[in-house]
Amino acid sequence: MFAEIITIGDELLIGQVIDTNSAWMGQELNKIGIEVLRIVSIRDREEEILEAIDNAINRVSIVLLTGGLGPTKDDITKTTLCKYFHTELVFSENVFENIKQLLAGKIPMNALNKSQAMVPRDCLVINNPVGSAPVSWFERGDKVLVSMPGVPLEMQTVMKESVLPRLHQRFHSDVIIHQTFMVQHYPESVLAEKLESWESSLPECLKLAYLPKSGIIRLRLTGRGKDKNSLESTLNCEKEKLENLLGADILTEEDIPLEIMVGELLKRKKLTVSTAESCTGGNIATRLTSIAGSSEYFKGSVVAYDNTIKVSLLNVSPATLELHGAVSEDTVIEMVKGAMNALKTDCAVATSGIAGPGGGTPDKPVGTVWIAAGYKNEILTYKQETNHGRMLNIEKAVNNAFLLLRELIK
Amino acid sequence: MFAEIITIGDELLIGQVIDTNSAWMGQELNKIGIEVLRIVSIRDREEEILEAIDNAINRVSIVLLTGGLGPTKDDITKTTLCKYFHTELVFSENVFENIKQLLAGKIPMNALNKSQAMVPRDCLVINNPVGSAPVSWFERGDKVLVSMPGVPLEMQTVMKESVLPRLHQRFHSDVIIHQTFMVQHYPESVLAEKLESWESSLPECLKLAYLPKSGIIRLRLTGRGKDKNSLESTLNCEKEKLENLLGADILTEEDIPLEIMVGELLKRKKLTVSTAESCTGGNIATRLTSIAGSSEYFKGSVVAYDNTIKVSLLNVSPATLELHGAVSEDTVIEMVKGAMNALKTDCAVATSGIAGPGGGTPDKPVGTVWIAAGYKNEILTYKQETNHGRMLNIEKAVNNAFLLLRELIK
């Protein structure tokens, strides 16, 4: 069963907004056996929307639209859908009630809010519990078209509560299983060579993909077929072969961010963690606290961007800074000890480096980052030496800090 | 002049990777007067790639492909392009030399790396200085198709160094100007009502768009036409009218992140800043340090996720925590003072709240965040009370912290 996603909005085409909705939708649709064939982003122009809808509806059974449902003039999805389906807008008492409740005590109702209660006739209108733009669900023959708001929280809420369950019920479809392996220590081409003969002999129903990112490669094995049990046993058999080939270089067999992997490990071992960050500037803390419930193991951080703070709050010795510089193994070792002491945690990670673009020297070029992980009296260090630009240097340092901490406490 | 972007890769459709390339490309193309009509994401399947290319080439003059150029089996863009353009792969000595240099001293050359030197005949091959997959530039009649690697750093490098300058030279095109206004204090519908009559009377060549995000609305006025001077003077005239309508609610007339806006202000006033973060968990520091050169004004942070750290490092009184709770005006006031003292900065921001999904109480429901900004002896506070889910609650608190600090020191 195939779907196409159409995201509507000039802001996507001029690049002012990154389309994060489609990836989320792709993940959720896959879980119910619906495969996304295409994602198309188009402008708020009637003829372009009409053309995209028409193309999609001829190609697949399910067309999902997001965006263009706001109360302002540039939002024309609703009227365009009326044109496509030869219908008109009518006032919905239900939707109006919903909007009234949403606005109650916040902002006064005005004509534009009220206009959100005008909905296409000849479709199922589904209330949006977290916003004023409702969902329109059109069925024509064996095709379904659903128009949803583009605000991520609203789209996710209506998808989870209404659209996904309805699609699941409406369409019978193939079983799709994904199994991801997070692999460390390999450049993509070396890994591909190592796996070549295994990959060539994979059964027809399985497909392998490589997804390299910031020093880690996610290998994704996708199976599709009619029978869940036989698909699972085929996949398990190939999974075992892969485990034998890669051994401990497989970090985990879940497709999870490293902060969750490390968080679970800390929870299991009942350990607390803190961070002492220079060049990563709070990014490790940010990643750790992005996980709900992280307060169980994460206590806090000192972001010591300025050297005076490395000394005053992390007790790094001025002599070390003088002798070895801030970007040095000695400094990160003192930082990680300082974090465990000052923040009273069982373990800690520390970073100090030159994220770039400026600040490099012949000895310590841009991209040089020293990382330390500490657990009680044990300390591991790692020197990162590649330069992929400021943001990627920081991201890679965060990942390496997580990998180093895992190595130490696993 | 119109372009279409085609991004290729199963990982985009199943949602394992978010397409950030297209937004970046859209921005850069706009700057040279090329408008992106569509962004299409498709799977690594020959027939789907062929169909997407054919559709695009019939619709627009410029087709830009990214992805599917890796050395592994799932990458088939190169062979598919050969099929589409009735040509074949040939070995390029130049590209091979480039790959050798890139790998030198890092990983050994293997057959897969070497296969990257096979390039389509009958096209211009442009070296990729930061990766092993080169760019293929096809010209057929008045149409141009360019195939680029999908790794963001590689795509950006080849676009900036080769593709954009060539496109600019090759195509004459309309002038496009964007002017963005960042507006605070308005829900979208209220702002739209306020601007309705002005918007209706905008000249044909100007178009207005609303881009709301985390408490701020970016208004984007886009002009397009043949003559740059007349377009600019029309736009300036409307800009003045808008400034009169909105006054001080216009935060800035640049489309920049708040961390840059605040950073520039701090630099101009020669002030230093620190942060004391509880529920934002390092996100304010992360945003501040995402800007190269931020070490000029940003000194460091204490992420006090655990209350003991609020006491030990920020000198928050245990009595305050006991009496008012961690999520209170009194606590963030003490935190912000503690940050200025401990980190020795002229100003600081502090946050304490319930990001969710758990931890809410009837008194302090999920989404409640207290924020303080301090500058010497002056302190401003703000209570954020909406709940849009953990990540958005945090993002909004970061934005409000920046706005509060700006309010205080501007």
Image (cartoon, coloured by chain):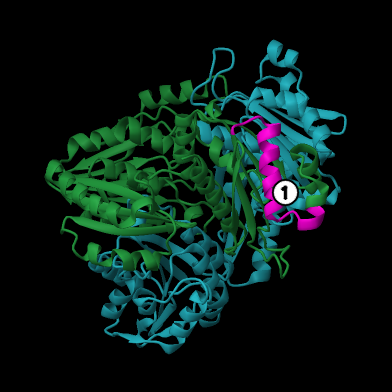
Chain colours: A green, B cyan
Q: Which residue is at 50% across, 28% downward?
A: A270
Quarter of the rendering occupied by the C terminus of chain B:
top right
Q: Establish if B72 lies above or below A84.
A: below
Q: Quadrant of residue A337?
A: top right
Residue labelled with disc 1 = B261
Residue A214 is one of the magenta-drawn residues: no
Label 1 crowd bin: few (<14), some (14–19), many (20+), radius 10 Å: some
Left or right of residue A210: residue B380: right
Q: Which residue is at 33% across, 66% downward?
A: A192
Residue furthest front as drawn:
A377
Chain hosting mark 1 = B
Can residue B197 be seen in this snapshot? Answer: no
Q: Amino acid at mark 1?
A: Met
Q: Quadrant of residue B228?
A: bottom right
Residue furthest top as drawn:
B323
Can residue A7 be seen in this snapshot? Answer: yes
How far from the left and from the top, in percent, is residue B193? 58, 37
How far from the left and from the top, in percent, is residue A247? 34, 52
Q: Establish if A233 lies above or below A355.
A: above
Q: Main secondary structure of the magenta part?
A: helix
How far from the left and from the top, in percent, is residue B206? 58, 58
Magenta-highlighted residues: A321-346
Left or right of residue B165: residue A59: left
Secondary structure at numbered mark 1: helix
Q: Establish if A2 lies above or below B349.
A: below
